[in-house]
Image (cartoon, rainbow, N blue to C red):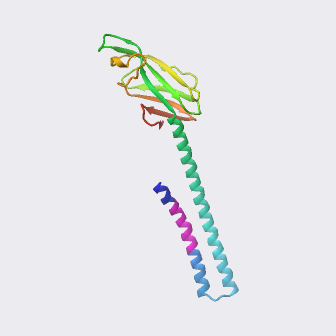
Amino acid sequence: MGQRIWRRLRGDAWVIAVSGLGVGFALGWLVTAELSPETAGAAGTWVGAIATIATILWAIHVFRAETEARVRDRLENEQALARGVRYRLLGGGGYGQPGEKVMQSVHVEISNDTTEPVSWQGTSVDGVRPQRAWDSFAPIAAGESKRITMDTDPFSAPDEEFSGRELRSKSSTIFYRIGGVDWRRTGDGQPEKC
């Protein structure tokens, strides 16, 4: 916020400085010179030229400020849209004795709480290797959820994380596309552009 105000003041300062110098120069010239028709005409020409320069500088400043505001608004809208996509990593099935169980699948539940369709592009789970590439499917429509199951190489997991319960012992990242922008989101963290 402070940086934005400083940039605006800096842009305004150029226009004010050029205008002030020009008007001061023209007034000084009128006061110290004889007021002949040529002098008055020359002073008017100078004031007009300085006003033209100040107007051009002001137009450039306004254009840059509006462009920055549009870009900032677009980025904020993209970020808000990306935050509307959430996911949970859930434990799948497995085998073994209590305390020594091995999981061999995971579920990814994706919720699209936005107004745009979401294209899911994959999920990465630390220490877990899928047996094959993730299947692709149609984008998730606005306001809908989807659950994807993936068979994995066997890995050990706590007993309480099997059978569709939240898989908290593993860190995961989801990759998705919404509004034409690719994103990644790790756990409950904020989405980041890819």
Q: Give the residue displayed 64% in from the left and 68% down from the top.
A: 52
* 16 is within the stretch colored magenta: yes
The residue located at (62%, 64%) in the rendering is 56
Question: Would you say 108 lies left or right of 58 here?
Answer: left
Q: How many marks?
A: 0
Which residue occupies 63% across, 89% down? 34
Give the farthest residue toward the bottom. 34
Question: Percent from the top left, x then y, of residue 127?
Answer: 36, 23
Picture layout, residue 28 above or below residue 130: below
Whether residue 160 appears in magenta in the rendering, the answer is: no
Question: Image quarter for residue 74?
Answer: top right
Regarding residue 156, the answer to whether it shows in the image is no
Rendered location of residue 179, percent (x, y): 57, 35
Residue at the extreme left of the image, as rendered: 99
Please state the horizontal and vertical placement of residue 126, each as a whole percent of the image.
Answer: 37, 26
Residue at x 38% of width, y 17% of height? 162
In depth, the one of 43 and 152 nearer the eye is: 152
Image quadrant in which you'd find residue 95: top left
- Confirm whether residue 15 shows in the render: yes
Q: Main secondary structure of the magenta part?
A: helix
In the rendering, at what x and y percent does residue 40 appear? Answer: 67, 83
* Picture layout, residue 46 above or below residue 164: below
Q: Furthest-right residue in view? A: 37
Q: Which residues are magenta?
A: 8-20
Q: Is residue 147 above or below residue 82?
A: above
